[in-house]
Image (tube, grey):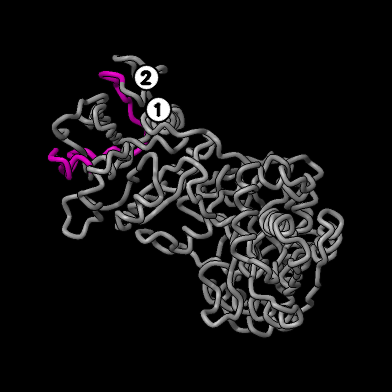
Amino acid sequence: MNNDNRHDLILILDFGAQYTLLIARRLRECGVYCEVIAPDCAMAEILNKKPKGLIFSGGPESVYAKNAPRVLPEIYQAGIPILGICYGQQLMAHDLGGQVDAAGNREYGHAHLILRSTDALFEGYASPGDQLTCWMSHGDKVLVPPAGFQITAVTESAPVAAMADEVRHFYGVQFHPEVAHTPFGKKLLQQFALGPCGCRADWKPATIIEDAVADIQRQVGSAQVICGVSGGVDSCTVAALIHKAIGDQLTCIFVDHGLLRAGEAEQVRNDFAEALGIHLIYADVKERFLAKLKGVEDPEQKRKIIGEEFVRVFEQYASDVQDAKFLAQGTLYPDVIESGGSSNAHTIKTHHNVGGLPADMNLTVIEPLRMLFKDEVRAVAHELGLPKGMVWRHPFPGPGLAIRVIGEVTEDRLAILRAADEIFMNELHSSGWYEKLSQALVVLTPIRSVGVMGDQRTYSHPVVLRAVITDDFMTASAARIDYDILDKISSRIVNEVNGINRVVYDLTSKPPGTIEWE
């Protein structure tokens, strides 16, 4: 999504922190538009974007290390307000003549922030002497701030937990205001954006739609667009946006790759046509995908195979659409970052619609949601008038059940998983838990366990139930579903699904785990 100076902009320079995208999300919750860029971005490009403020993110490096990421010195001469967070504060201090060194005691977790003085970041909700709870995660610290800076807060282990140069509007905090563990963090970011930066809080679903429609029209022109839809909120929102922008120039294709849940193909076809009124082509290519996946166990290879076959199917059907030049996808910001979309980030897993696309495909990808978080997509979908059931449908990955069958994907294993998943979803809906959860799924393991049923020994598969609660899908907590409900689900699966004799519940948060198992 291009800003083109339509909104006041804050640029976030990404130094590789796992929380960088949360900074963006918090700012957008405050109604402020922002973009994440690489720290080595050319100064001319930064100035061309006309940012009202800059934020230096955290990062895993030490500022005094030989190959530590840097910014151009002239960035401090541009007259743009700057907020440095964790590594960002240390970098600012290091560049401007302060002292940074390794911390004797690494701070990780909650810390007590003692305010020494108020500045633009704390004014109005905190006073000198106040003690605030914040979240720390650092091994280095600023020992002495640069000339012109005042120490505004300290902790037991950080002598410069926050600093400010009110003349140049440069600010630094050692803690992470973007995470929920810093209760006042969102307020701090809002104060920076609306105060020293002077931003307008005009980033709202209606303006997102307006901008996206304009971008689509400019990019596509009179060409035809092919859009793959799955029935989920991401792909349906993309379809609705593109249809709003170019109308009949859009052709939607639903690919039934044989990796869907029970009854899903029929449900998607009916719901999509009824809700959006857009022409939908149904591509039944189950055998094609399963043949390609035969013998494949590695999850990254599965994703790449599925990503390539998706495109080949689209190309095949697009050949019948005159002047089809674009492939629309529901890629979100978390997809991009987990696929190594930041120059300083590691690839966690390749998403089929990001890193799994073949280099030689004939269609140009268009991704109207690429800069958005899931909650923003839902807000846009609601604004576009999509039905509630579609807006709040749990995410379902493009590779489908292929990444929930651990190991080789076969028709028999898919049948077992479908049956277990159907029971899980039905019980979540009937108990009222589905609406409380962000995502729920079943994983079929490749191992077998000994059990006893009807006085006979069994040697069958265990399945794993996973249910999480999250706002942004960058972090997630395991849901505490009532034990009686889990007990009923377990009993039904074991008794009704042949091939399963044990059910376990995944309590792992994200991080360290991911939501999906593969």
Helix, strand or loop at mark 2: loop
Which residue type carries mark 2? Glu
Quick check: is 277 in the magenta stretch? no
Please give the residue where the numbered disc 1 appears in the rendered image.
Answer: 195
| Quadrant position of residue 492 | bottom right
- Residue 193 percent across, percent down from the top left: 42, 33
Q: Residues within 10 Å of mark 2 (few under 14, many from 20)?
A: few
Instruction: Say which of marks 2 and 1 sits in front.
Output: 1
Can see residue 356?
yes
Q: As drawn, is 129 to the left or to the right of 426?
A: left
Q: Which mark is residue 417?
A: none
In the rendered image, the vertical position of residue 248 relative to residue 175, given as above or below: below
x and y percentages locating residue 425 in the rendered image: 76, 52
- Which numbered dot is residue 123? 2
Q: Quadrant of residue 124?
A: top left
Rendered view: 187 above or below 294: above
Pick whichever of labels 2 and 1 is earlier in the sequence.
2
Residue 233 left/right relative to 103 = right
378 lies left or right of 18: right
Q: Which residues are magenta?
A: 92-118
What secondary structure characterizes most of the magenta part?
Answer: strand
Cβ atoms under marks 2 and 1 closer than 8 Å: yes
| Residue 441 in sight here | no
* Residue at horizontal 41 percent and vertical 50 percent from the top: 49
Determine whether, in the image, residue 11 is placed left or right of residue 77: right
Q: Locate residue 58, reporting x and y percent.
A: 33, 46
User: How many residues crowd mark 1 within 10 Å: few (<14), some (14–19), many (20+)?
Assistant: some
